Amino acid sequence: MSEYFVIMSFELTNQDLMNDWKTLSKEIDEDIAKADGFISRDSGIDKDGRVYCLVKWQSKVHHVNFTKLLEAREQWPQMMAYFCNIANMETSTTQILEIF
Protein backbone atom coordinates (compact mmCIF):
# COMPACT_ATOMS: atom_id res chain seq x y z
CA MET A 1 0.00 0.00 0.00
CA SER A 2 1.34 3.41 -0.94
CA GLU A 3 1.33 6.43 1.35
CA TYR A 4 -0.63 9.49 0.35
CA PHE A 5 0.62 13.07 0.57
CA VAL A 6 -1.65 16.14 0.34
CA ILE A 7 0.00 19.51 -0.26
CA MET A 8 -2.15 22.61 0.08
CA SER A 9 -0.89 26.14 -0.37
CA PHE A 10 -2.48 29.55 -0.12
CA GLU A 11 -1.79 33.17 0.62
CA LEU A 12 -3.12 34.78 3.77
CA THR A 13 -5.94 37.26 3.27
CA ASN A 14 -3.71 39.68 5.15
CA GLN A 15 -0.12 39.14 6.34
CA ASP A 16 -1.16 40.54 9.73
CA LEU A 17 -3.07 37.27 10.23
CA MET A 18 0.10 35.16 10.53
CA ASN A 19 -0.35 34.70 14.29
CA ASP A 20 -3.98 33.73 13.73
CA TRP A 21 -2.83 31.16 11.19
CA LYS A 22 -0.21 29.75 13.58
CA THR A 23 -2.85 29.37 16.29
CA LEU A 24 -5.31 27.71 13.90
CA SER A 25 -2.57 25.48 12.52
CA LYS A 26 -1.82 24.18 16.03
CA GLU A 27 -5.51 23.43 16.52
CA ILE A 28 -5.57 21.55 13.22
CA ASP A 29 -2.47 19.58 14.30
CA GLU A 30 -4.20 18.52 17.52
CA ASP A 31 -7.39 17.52 15.70
CA ILE A 32 -5.85 15.65 12.80
CA ALA A 33 -3.40 13.76 15.03
CA LYS A 34 -6.36 11.69 16.29
CA ALA A 35 -7.40 10.60 12.78
CA ASP A 36 -7.10 7.01 11.69
CA GLY A 37 -4.30 6.61 9.15
CA PHE A 38 -2.72 10.00 9.85
CA ILE A 39 1.09 10.03 9.66
CA SER A 40 2.26 13.66 9.84
CA ARG A 41 1.42 17.28 9.13
CA ASP A 42 3.77 20.21 8.61
CA SER A 43 3.01 23.82 7.84
CA GLY A 44 5.41 26.49 6.66
CA ILE A 45 5.71 29.72 4.75
CA ASP A 46 7.93 30.70 1.82
CA LYS A 47 9.80 33.97 1.26
CA ASP A 48 6.79 35.41 -0.60
CA GLY A 49 4.40 34.79 2.29
CA ARG A 50 2.67 31.75 0.77
CA VAL A 51 1.63 29.14 3.34
CA TYR A 52 2.14 25.43 2.67
CA CYS A 53 0.52 22.54 4.52
CA LEU A 54 1.84 19.04 3.94
CA VAL A 55 -0.21 16.14 5.27
CA LYS A 56 0.89 12.52 5.00
CA TRP A 57 -1.63 9.67 5.24
CA GLN A 58 -1.29 5.90 5.22
CA SER A 59 -3.61 5.79 2.19
CA LYS A 60 -6.05 7.77 0.09
CA VAL A 61 -8.91 5.98 1.88
CA HIS A 62 -7.72 7.36 5.23
CA HIS A 63 -7.59 10.90 3.83
CA VAL A 64 -11.04 10.63 2.23
CA ASN A 65 -12.57 9.14 5.39
CA PHE A 66 -11.15 11.93 7.56
CA THR A 67 -12.40 14.57 5.13
CA LYS A 68 -15.92 13.08 5.21
CA LEU A 69 -15.92 13.00 9.02
CA LEU A 70 -14.65 16.58 9.17
CA GLU A 71 -17.31 17.86 6.76
CA ALA A 72 -20.03 16.03 8.69
CA ARG A 73 -19.29 17.94 11.91
CA GLU A 74 -21.98 20.32 13.05
CA GLN A 75 -19.40 23.11 13.39
CA TRP A 76 -18.01 22.57 9.85
CA PRO A 77 -19.54 25.77 8.36
CA GLN A 78 -18.13 27.89 11.19
CA MET A 79 -14.74 26.19 10.94
CA MET A 80 -14.56 26.88 7.21
CA ALA A 81 -15.71 30.48 7.64
CA TYR A 82 -12.92 31.08 10.17
CA PHE A 83 -10.36 29.36 7.93
CA CYS A 84 -11.48 31.45 4.93
CA ASN A 85 -11.08 34.65 6.95
CA ILE A 86 -7.39 33.74 7.29
CA ALA A 87 -6.68 31.89 4.03
CA ASN A 88 -7.31 33.55 0.68
CA MET A 89 -9.06 30.63 -1.00
CA GLU A 90 -8.78 32.27 -4.41
CA THR A 91 -5.04 31.61 -4.18
CA SER A 92 -5.44 28.07 -2.83
CA THR A 93 -3.95 25.08 -4.64
CA THR A 94 -3.94 21.41 -3.68
CA GLN A 95 -1.64 18.71 -4.96
CA ILE A 96 -1.89 15.05 -4.17
CA LEU A 97 1.01 12.65 -4.41
CA GLU A 98 1.07 8.91 -4.04
CA ILE A 99 4.35 7.95 -2.44
CA PHE A 100 5.75 4.62 -3.52
Image: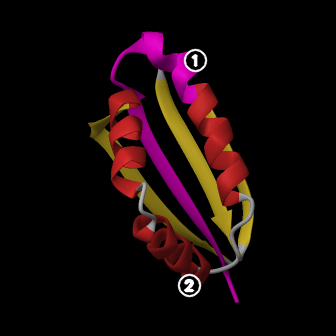
Residue 29: x percent and y percent?
Answer: 69, 47
Instruction: Please name the amino acid that badge 2 sits on.
Output: Val
Q: Quadrant of the C terminus?
A: bottom right
Measure the alpha-carbon separation of dots 1 and 2. 32 Å
The residue carrying mark 1 is 19
Would residue 79 appear left or right of 24 to someone viewing this image?
A: left
Residue lying at 45% horizontally and 75% vertically, measured from the top left: 68
Residue 63: x percent and y percent?
Answer: 56, 73
Compared to 47, does 86 lie above or below?
A: below
**Callout 1 environment at 10 Å: few (<14), some (14 to 19), or many (20+)?**
few
Could you say which is closer to the camera, residue 42 or residue 75?
A: 75
Would residue 63 appear left or right of 88 to someone viewing this image?
A: right
Instruction: Please name the amino acid that badge 1 sits on.
Output: Asn
Residue lying at 46% horizontally and 17% vertically, measured from the top left: 17
Q: Are marks 1 and 2 in contact (CB under 8 Å)?
A: no
Tell which tag, 1 or 2, sits nearer the viewer.
1
**Callout 2 environment at 10 Å: few (<14), some (14 to 19), or many (20+)?**
few
Residue 54: x percent and y percent?
Answer: 61, 50
Could you say which is closer to the camera, residue 84 or residue 39?
A: 84
Q: Does the image show residue 82?
A: yes
The residue carrying mark 2 is 61
Q: Quadrant of the N terminus?
A: bottom right
Q: How many marks?
A: 2
Does residue 8 belong to the magenta stretch? yes
Does residue 94 belong to the magenta stretch? no
- The magenta segment is 1-21
Asked where in the image residue 26 lies, by quadrant, the reply is: top right
Asked where in the image residue 37 lies, by quadrant, the reply is: bottom right
Compared to 52, does 50 lie above or below?
A: above
